[in-house]
Image (cartoon, coloured by chain):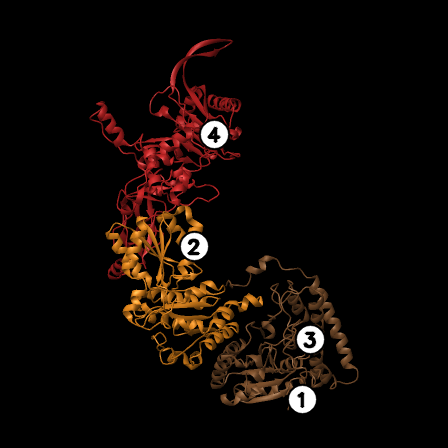
C-alpha cells in the first residue's frame, strides 16, 4: 500500500473517515463540523455521511461530553470535537466521572467506545483559555485512555485505534503541529496501537521522554547535542494511558539519565508522574536525578512571542540536556 | 516505514561480530536470502531474511560488535521506491552502533537486577566522595572496591562508567595484549612478537575453561585392546567406519547402561538423560568447537562415522549453526587424531559430568593368553581417559562404565 | 387518556408494594444495623416512578435519579440485586461495589443507571435518545430528575438541542419542593418546573405525582409523541417527600405544615383494585422481599479484587 504526504489534521480526518466507512455506529459532533470543523479535520464528512452522523451543536461542552457517554453506553461510537482542550473543564463531570466511571460504578464490564478530541497547546496567540494542555487530567482519573500523537502518521493510526478501542479515549491533537505534514500510510488496516511508545532517535547518553509538540523540538535538540558529543535518545510516548513503561525503563536502564519534556505545566504535569516512577523503579540505574521540563507555571499569554517564551524551546531542551549529561 | 534489522536470537549466543554484508543497500531481497554474516562466540552464521523487502541502510560495518537483538540495518516493505526510502532515512536519525559503542571494553551487564538480589553499596562506601545510585549498584553487583575507583564526574563524582572502567581494568589487565606486550618490551624479552587480538571464540573458550577448571575433576585411564576393532574395520560390515566412529558408537551404547555419566550437574539436582547427544571436540584454526551428534544411541558405527565427519567438515569450513553446538549430554575429545599423545585427560564441558578422551593408538608389546599360559604379542591398543566431575560421580560408576566400554570394544 | 388495563393495574400495585416493602425494610435496616453509605428513602414517593415506568417498553432507556428503589422495580428489576447492592454483597447489581446512592443497572431491562452527581442524567439520556434516532430503533429515553437539579446548566443545554433535533426524550421531574435542605421557592421564581418547557417549544405537563395512574396516563402520551418523532416532553410530577434527604437527616429545614396534605400512593392505587387484591399483593410482596433480604444477607462479601474490576473493558 502506498503512502501520501498530508497534514496532521487531515491525517486525523482520514483515520476518522476510514473508520466511519467501516462502522456505521460512529458519528461525530462538534461546533461547525458540518461546515468542515475549526481546523479542517471534518472537511467533506457531511457530504459522505449526512447530517445524521455529522452533527453541529451549540457551545455546550458538558452536553457534548455527556451525550457521548450516553450514546456510547447505548452502543454507539461517538466522536466529539471539543474545539479546545481547555473546555475539558467545562465538561468535567461528564468526562472524568461519567465517561470514566459509569461502567465501573455500575459494575458493568461492557464495551464503551467514545473519542473526545481535545486540541491542546500553544498555537500562536490563542491565549490562556485556549492553549491549555489538559492531558494530565486523563492520567489522574482512572477509566480513560489518553493519547497525544506527534506525527501525521500517528494522528491517523491512533484515531483508528481509538475508534476500535472498547474504552473512552481522550484524543489530544496538538495545535502546534496541526499544519505539520508527514508521510501517512493509506492502508485502511494501518493502526498505531494505544499504549506503545516510539523511539524516535536511538542514543546512549541520556533519554529524553516526551510527546506531542515537544517531540520535534527534542529531536532538534538531540541533533545539536550530538554535535557536542552528547548522544540523546528521544522517546515519543504517544499514549499517556496506558503508558509504555517498558520502553521508558528499558531506555533509562541503558542511558542512566532521563529527562521528561512536555508543553504542559511543569508542576504536577505528566512529567511529575513519569519522573517519580522512573526513580521508584530504576533508582539504582540512575547517574543523575530525573529532570522535568514543562511550561512555566503561569497562564499562557496571548502574545505569540511570550507564549513561546513560556514553553520549552529547542534551546532550553538542549541546555537542560547538557546539564543533565554533566551531572 | 523503516523497520529494524536486528541480530537474531540464536540459542545461548550473546555476542556477535559482523563479518560481512551479503546484501547491498537498495537491494531487494526475498525470504530466505542471506543478508549478512556474523561471527558469534561459537561459530559464524549466515543470517537470512524472514520476509521479503528492500535493504534501506547498513548501519553496522564489518568488524562491529553486537549483542543479540542489536540493530545492524534498516529495511522497508518490498516495492518501496528509492525516493521514499531516501525521504524516510532523512527523517530517521540513524546512529551507527560503532559510534555508540565507544572504546572496546569487556561487556559488563548494566541492566537493572532485581533489588532483592543486589543490595547497592551504602553511600559511605565511597569515602565521602559523591557517587551515583547506578555506581552504588554496579559496585555491589560486581564486587568492585570503591577505593580503587577514580571518580571522573563533576567534583570527582563516581559514576557507573567509573565503576565499569575499574572493573574492566581488572578483567583486562593480565590479558590485554598491548599491555603484556609493552611489559615484555620493557623487560627486553621480546621485541619482535606479533600481537594477535583474541577472536570472539578464543574469549569464549577462555571463559569456559576458567569455569571448567573450578570443577573438581579426576581422570581414570584404562587400556583397551583394539585388535578386534581393527579386524572389524576390515570386515564387509565394518568397512568405512573410523576408529573414532566405532569407539563413539560403543560409548553411546555403554552410556545407556550407565546413565549416571550421561548427565548434567546442577546445584540442586542431576539431570540424567535417557538419550545420548554426543559432543565431539573438533580442532579448527579458530579454536576448539564441540558440535553435537543428536541421538547418538540410534546410530550404527558407520552412521556415527558419517555424522562425525559431516559435523567436523561443517566446523572446519565455518558452517556450524548455533543449534549444532548446544544440548550435548557427554563429550568425546580426540587429541590422538592430531598426534600420538600418551594421555587424553581434559577439562570437562560443563554442565556435563563426564568426558571421554582418546589419545593416540599405540602398537605395544603385551601379554596375551596362549592356551593355559601367556605369550608376548604386539597389539594395537589405546589408553582411554575418562575425566569426571567428582561432585557428581565417584570412581566406582566411572570404572564400571570403562569396563563395559572396554569389553564392548574388545569383543566387536 | 389511556387508562391502564386491570392486569397492568395489578402489576403496578405489586411493584409499588415491593418497593414499599424494600423502603420499610431499609429504614429499619439503616436504623438497626450497620449500613455503609447513606440511604435516600423514597417511601411515600413511589407513585411517580411506578406510573412512569409502566408507560415504557422494556427496551426503552431509563436514566433514573430518584430516591428509593421504585424506578428499578418499576422497570422490572428483582429485589435481590437491589438488596444485595444495599448490603454491599457480591450478588448486588454492582457486583460488590455497594449502594446508597444506587447504581443499579440492567441493560437488558433498559435500566441505564444513575449518576451520583445529581442532575447528571440530561445529556446521558440525550445520548441514548440520539442513538435511537440515528439507528431508528423506536426506543424512547426517559431522564428522571428532581426539582433541585432543574437549575443545572445541562438541563438547558440538553433540552435546547433535544427540542431542536426532536429527540425521543422525556424529561421527567419529581418536584417535592425541597432540594436536599433548600426550599425550591428560594431558587426558582416559578413554582412549576413545567413552565420551562415553553421556552424550548415543547409540551410541559403537570401531574399529581402521588397518583400512579395519572402519571401513567401522561407518560403514555409523551412516549407516543417521542416514538412518533415529534420530540421531547417535559413532565412535572408534584410529589411529597415523606422523609429527610437521607435516613437520619435531622431535617431542621422542614416546614411543619409540609406533610399535612400527604396522601399515600399505595392507598390511592389500592382504591382502584377490587376486593382484597391489594392486601393479597402486599402480603405477596412482603414475602418476596423477606426472601430476597435473607438471600442478600447470606451472600458473600466482596473481596478486594472487586476494586480492580470493570475499569477497562478488554475486547
Query: Label 3 lies in what chain?
Result: C
The residue at which mark 3 appears reads as: C19
Write down the colour of chain B: red
Same chain check for tags 3 and 2? no
Where C212 falls versus C304 (above or below)? below
Q: Is there CB contact under 8 Å for labels 1 and 3?
A: no
User: Which of the image's four quarters has the N terminus of chain B?
Assistant: bottom left
| Cα–Cα gap, marks 2 and 4 | 49 Å
Q: Nearer the viewer, residue B383 or A187?
A: A187
Mark 4 or mark 1, whichever is nearer to me: 1
The disc at residue A276 is 2
Provide the secondary structure element on which disc 2 rests: helix
Percent position of residue A130, x then y: 36, 73
Same chain check for tags 2 and 4? no
Horizontal side of B30 relative to B245 (left or right) equals left
For mark 1, does the 10 Å Cα neighbourhood hold few (<14), some (14 to 19), or many (20 or more) residues? few
The residue at which mark 1 appears reads as: C3
Q: Is residue B26 visible?
A: no
Same chain check for tags 4 and 1? no
Same chain check for tags 1 and 2? no
Q: Which one of the lettered chains is coloured orange?
A: A
Write down the colour of chain C: brown
| Cα–Cα gap, marks 1 and 2 | 66 Å
Farthest residue, direction left: B192
Horizontal side of B39 relative to A56 (left or right) equals left
Provide the secondary structure element on which disc 4 rests: loop
| Cα–Cα gap, marks 3 and 2 | 51 Å
The disc at residue B353 is 4
Amino acid at each position: 500500500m502506498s503512502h501520501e504526504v498530508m497534514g496532521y489534521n487531515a491525517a486525523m480526518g482520514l483515520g476518522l473517515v476510514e473508520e466511519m466507512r467501516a462502522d456505521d455506529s460512529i458519528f461525530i459532533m462538534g461546533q461547525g463540523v458540518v461546515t468542515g470543523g475549526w481546523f479542517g479535520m471534518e472537511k467533506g464528512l457531511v457530504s459522505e455521511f449526512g447530517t445524521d452522523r455529522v452533527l453541529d451543536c451549540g457551545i455546550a461542552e458538558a452536553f457534548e461530553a455527556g451525550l457521548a457517554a450516553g450514546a456510547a453506553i447505548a452502543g454507539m461510537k461517538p466522536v466529539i470535537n471539543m474545539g479546545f482542550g481547555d473546555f475539558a473543564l467545562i465538561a468535567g463531570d461528564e468526562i472524568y466521572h461519567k465517561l470514566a466511571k459509569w461502567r465501573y460504578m455500575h459494575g458493568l464490564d461492557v464495551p464503551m467506545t467514545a473519542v473526545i478530541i481535545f486540541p491542546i497547546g500553544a498555537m500562536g496567540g490563542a491565549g490562556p483559555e485556549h492553549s491549555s494542555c489538559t492531558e494530565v487530567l486523563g492520567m489522574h482519573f482512572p477509566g480513560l485512555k489518553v493519547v497525544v500523537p506527534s506525527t501525521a502518521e500517528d494522528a491517523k493510526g491512533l484515531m483508528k485505534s481509538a475508534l476500535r478501542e472498547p474504552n473512552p479515549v481522550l484524543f489530544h491533537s496538538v495545535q502546534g503541529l496541526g499544519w505539520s505534514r508527514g508521510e501517512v500510510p493509506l492502508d485502511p488496516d494501518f493502526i498505531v496501537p494505544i499504549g506503545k511508545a516510539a523511539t524516535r532517535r536511538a542514543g546512549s547518553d541520556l533519554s529524553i521522554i516526551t510527546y506531542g509538540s515537544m517531540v520535534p523540538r527534542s529531536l532538534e535538540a538531540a541533533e545539536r547535542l550530538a554535535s557536542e558529543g552528547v548522544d540523546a535518545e528521544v522517546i515519543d510516548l504517544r499514549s499517556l494511558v496506558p503508558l509504555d513503561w517498558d520502553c521508558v525503563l528499558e531506555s533509562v536502564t541503558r542511558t542512566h539519565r532521563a529527562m521528561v519534556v512536555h508543553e504542559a505545566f511543569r508542576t504536577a504535569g505528566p512529567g511529575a508522574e513519569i519522573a517519580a516512577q522512573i526513580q521508584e523503579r530504576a533508582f539504582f540505574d540512575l547517574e543523575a536525578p530525573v529532570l522535568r521540563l514543562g511550561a512555566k507555571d503561569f497562564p499562557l499569554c496571548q502574545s505569540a512571542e511570550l507564549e513561546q517564551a513560556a514553553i520549552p524551546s529547542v534551546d532550553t531542551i538542549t541546555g537542560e540536556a547538557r546539564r543533565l549529561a554533566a551531572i | 516505514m523503516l523497520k529494524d534489522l536486528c541480530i537474531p536470537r540464536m540459542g545461548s549466543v550473546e555476542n556477535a561480530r559482523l563479518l560481512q554484508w551479503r546484501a547491498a543497500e537498495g537491494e531487494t531481497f526475498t525470504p530466505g536470502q542471506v543478508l549478512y554474516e556474523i561471527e558469534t562466540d561459537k561459530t559464524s552464521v549466515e543470517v537470512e531474511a524472514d520476509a521479503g523487502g528492500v535493504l534501506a541502510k547498513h548501519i553496522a560495518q564489518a568488524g562491529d560488535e553486537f549483542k543479540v537483538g542489536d540493530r545492524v540495518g534498516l529495511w522497508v516493505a518490498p516495492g518501496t521506491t528509492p525516493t521514499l526510502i531516501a525521504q524516510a532515512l532523512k527523517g530517521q536519525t540513524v546512529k551507527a552502533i560503532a559510534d555508540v559503542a565507544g572504546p572496546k571494553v569487556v561487556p559488563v551487564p548494566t541492566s537493572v537486577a532485581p533489588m532483592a538480589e543486589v543490595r547497592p553499596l551504602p553511600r559511605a562506601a565511597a569515602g565521602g566522595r559523591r557517587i551515583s545510585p547506578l555506581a552504588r549498584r554496579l559496585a555491589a553487583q560486581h564486587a568492585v572496591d570503591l577505593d580503587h575507583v577514580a571518580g571522573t564526574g563533576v567534583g570527582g563524582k563516581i559514576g557507573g562508567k567509573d565503576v565499569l572502567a575499574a572493573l574492566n581494568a581488572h578483567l583486562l589487565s593480565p590479558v590485554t595484549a598491548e599491555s603484556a606486550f609493552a611489559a615484555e618490551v620493557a623487560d627486553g624479552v621480546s621485541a619482535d612478537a606479533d600481537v594477535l587480538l583474541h577472536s570472539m571464540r578464543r574469549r569464549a573458550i577462555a571463559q569456559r575453561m576458567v569455569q571448567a577448571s573450578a570443577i573438581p575433576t579426576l581422570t581414570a585411564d584404562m587400556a583397551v585392546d583394539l585388535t578386534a576393532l581393527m579386524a572389524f574395520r576390515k570386515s564387509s560390515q565394518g568397512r568405512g567406519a573410523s576408529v573414532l566412529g566405532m569407539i563413539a558408537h560403543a560409548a553411546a551404547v555403554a552410556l545407556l547402561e550407565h546413565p549416571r555419566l550421561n548427565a548434567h550437574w546442577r546445584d540442586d539436582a542431576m539431570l540424567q538423560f535417557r538419550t545420548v547427544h554426543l559432543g565431539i571436540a573438533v580442532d579448527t584454526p579458530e579454536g576448539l568447537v564441540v558440535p553435537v551428534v543428536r541421538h547418538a544411541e540410534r546410530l550404527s558405527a558407520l552412521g556415527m562415522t558419517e555424522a562425525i565427519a559431516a559435523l567436523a567438515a561443517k566446523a572446519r569450513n565455518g558452517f556450524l549453526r548455533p543449534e549444532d553446538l548446544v544440548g550435548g549430554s557427554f563429550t568425546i575429545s580426540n587429541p590422538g587424531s592430531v598426534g600420538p599423545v600418551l594421555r587424553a585427560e581434559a577439562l570437562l564441558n560443563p554442565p556435563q559430568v563426564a568426558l571421554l578422551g582418546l589419545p593416540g593408538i599405540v602398537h605395544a608389546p603385551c601379554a596375551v593368553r596362549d592356551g593355559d599360559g601367556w605369550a608376548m604379542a604386539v597389539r594395537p591398543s589405546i589408553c582411554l581417559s575418562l575425566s569426571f566431575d567428582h561432585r557428581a560421580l565417584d570412581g566406582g560408576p566411572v570404572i564400571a562404565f570403562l569396563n563395559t566400554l572396554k569389553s564392548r570394544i574388545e569383543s566387536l | 387518556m389511556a387508562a391502564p388495563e386491570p392486569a397492568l393495574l395489578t402489576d403496578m400495585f405489586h411493584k409499588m408494594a415491593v418497593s414499599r416493602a424494600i423502603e420499610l425494610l431499609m429504614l429499619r435496616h439503616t436504623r438497626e444495623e450497620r449500613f455503609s453509605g447513606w440511604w435516600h428513602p423514597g417511601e411515600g414517593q413511589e407513585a411517580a416512578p411506578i406510573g412512569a415506568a409502566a408507560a415504557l417498553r422494556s427496551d426503552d432507556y431509563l436514566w433514573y435519579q430518584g430516591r428509593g428503589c421504585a424506578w428499578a422495580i418499576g422497570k422490572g428489576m428483582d429485589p435481590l440485586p437491589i438488596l444485595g447492592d444495599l448490603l454491599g454483597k457480591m450478588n448486588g447489581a454492582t457486583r460488590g461495589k455497594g449502594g446508597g446512592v444506587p447504581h443499579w443497572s440492567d441493560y437488558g431491562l433498559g435500566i441505564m443507571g444513575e449518576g451520583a452527581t445529581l442532575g447528571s442524567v440530561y445529556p446521558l439520556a440525550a445520548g441514548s435518545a440520539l442513538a435511537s434516532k440515528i439507528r431508528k430503533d423506536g426506543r424512547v429515553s426517559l431522564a428522571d430528575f428532581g426539582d433541585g437539579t432543574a437549575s443545572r446548566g445541562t438541563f438547558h443545554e440538553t433540552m435546547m438541542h433535544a427540542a431542536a433535533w426532536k429527540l425521543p426524550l422525556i424529561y421527567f421531574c419529581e418536584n417535592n419542593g425541597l432540594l436536599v435542605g433548600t426550599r425550591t421557592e428560594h431558587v426558582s421564581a416559578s413554582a412549576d418546573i413545567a413552565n420551562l418547557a415553553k421556552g424550548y417549544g415543547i409540551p410541559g405537563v403537570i401531574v399529581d405525582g402521588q397518583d400512579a395512574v395519572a402519571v401513567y396516563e401522561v407518560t403514555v402520551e409523551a412516549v407516543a409523541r417521542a416514538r412518533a418523532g415529534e420530540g421531547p416532553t417535559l413532565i412535572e410530577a408534584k410529589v411529597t417527600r415523606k422523609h429527610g434527604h437521607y435516613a437520619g437527616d435531622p431535617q431542621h429545614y422542614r416546614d411543619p405544615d409540609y406533610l399535612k396534605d400527604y396522601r399515600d400512593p399505595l392507598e390511592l392505587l389500592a382504591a382502584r383494585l377490587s376486593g382484597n387484591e391489594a392486601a393479597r399483593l402486599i402480603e405477596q410482596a412482603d414475602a418476596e422481599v423477606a426472601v430476597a433480604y435473607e438471600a442478600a444477607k447470606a451472600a458473600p462479601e466482596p473481596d478486594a479484587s472487586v476494586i480492580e474490576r470493570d475499569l477497562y473493558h478488554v475486547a
